[in-house]
Amino acid sequence: MTATIPAGFALVDFKSPFMEVNGPIYAAIDEPTLHLGFRVEQRHCNLNSSLHGGMLATLADFAMGRALGRSRGTMQPLVTLNLNLDYIGTTAVGAWIEIFVQLKKSSGGVVFATCEIRDGEKLMLTASGVFKFIAMASSSPSRS
C-alpha cells in the first residue's frame, strides 16, 4: 500500500522482529513527547475490514514502552507488567491514526503511562500501562 505520510513524521527503525511485521510505524519529529503515526492496511484488519483490536493493543503497548524506554535519555529495555485497554471505536483501511503517550509517574524502576489512539478527532482507544526497566540482555549465550 502506498499512501502519503503526513509531514513531520519519520519511519521508526525497529529493533524488534515482532514490530517489523506489524508496522510500518512513524514517529513525529522534534516533539518532546512521543507521538506516533500509523497507516491502517488490510493486513491490520479483522474480518469486518476494521482495525483489529489486537493491533490497537499492540500499538498502545509499543508506544508506551518506547516513550518510557526513551524517558531516561537513551533507549532502555523494559517489560510490560500491566496493560489496561478501553476500546471506544475503530477505523478502516487507509486511515491515518495517531498515538499520544503521557508519562504519569516513575517510582524506582517501575513507570506508569497512559495513551490515546485517535483517527483525527475520533478517539478509538485509551490505555494505561505499568512497565519495569530491566537489565540489557547479553547477546552471547551463557556457559555453565
Image (spheres, rainbow, N blue to C red):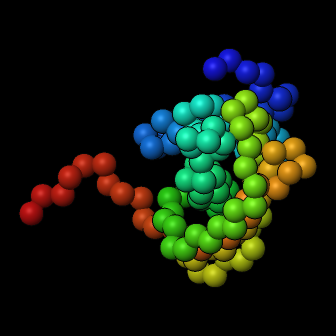
Image position, residue 38 (x, y; %)? 70, 38
Image x and y of residue 25, in percent: 64, 37
Total numbered badges shown on the rendered structure = 0
Which residue is pictured at 69% across the width and 33% down the height?
Answer: 93
Q: Quadrant of residue 1?
A: top right
The answer to whether 9 appears left or right of 49 in the picture is right
Q: Nearer the viewer, residue 23 or 133?
A: 23
Residue situated furthest left in the rendering: 144
Residue 15, compared with residue 57, is above or below; it is: above
- Residue 95 or 82: which is nearer the viewer? 95
Q: Quadrant of the C terminus?
A: bottom left
| Horizontal arrangement in the rendering, residue 116 relative to residue 121 (left or right) | left
In the image, taking residue 67 as reference, residue 116 lies left or right, namely: right
- Is residue 10 something that shows in the picture? no
Instruction: Point out the residue furthest to the front here.
Output: 48
Depicted 125 relative to depicted 114: above or below: above
Could you say where residue 17 lies in the image, as x and y percent from the top left? 43, 40
Give the farthest residue toward the top: 2
> Residue placed at 48% from the left, 36% from the top?
21
In the rendered image, the residue lying farthest to the right is 121
Residue 85 image position (x, y, % from top left): 65, 67
Residue 110, compared with residue 60, is above or below; it is below
Q: Nearer the viewer, residue 50 or 44?
A: 50
Q: Hey, which quadrant is residue 40 in on the image?
A: top right
Residue 22, above or below 73: above
User: At x 62% / y 71%, what residue is drawn?
Assistant: 84
> Is residue 126 shown to the viewer in this render?
yes
Q: Residue at image x 78%, y 22%?
A: 4
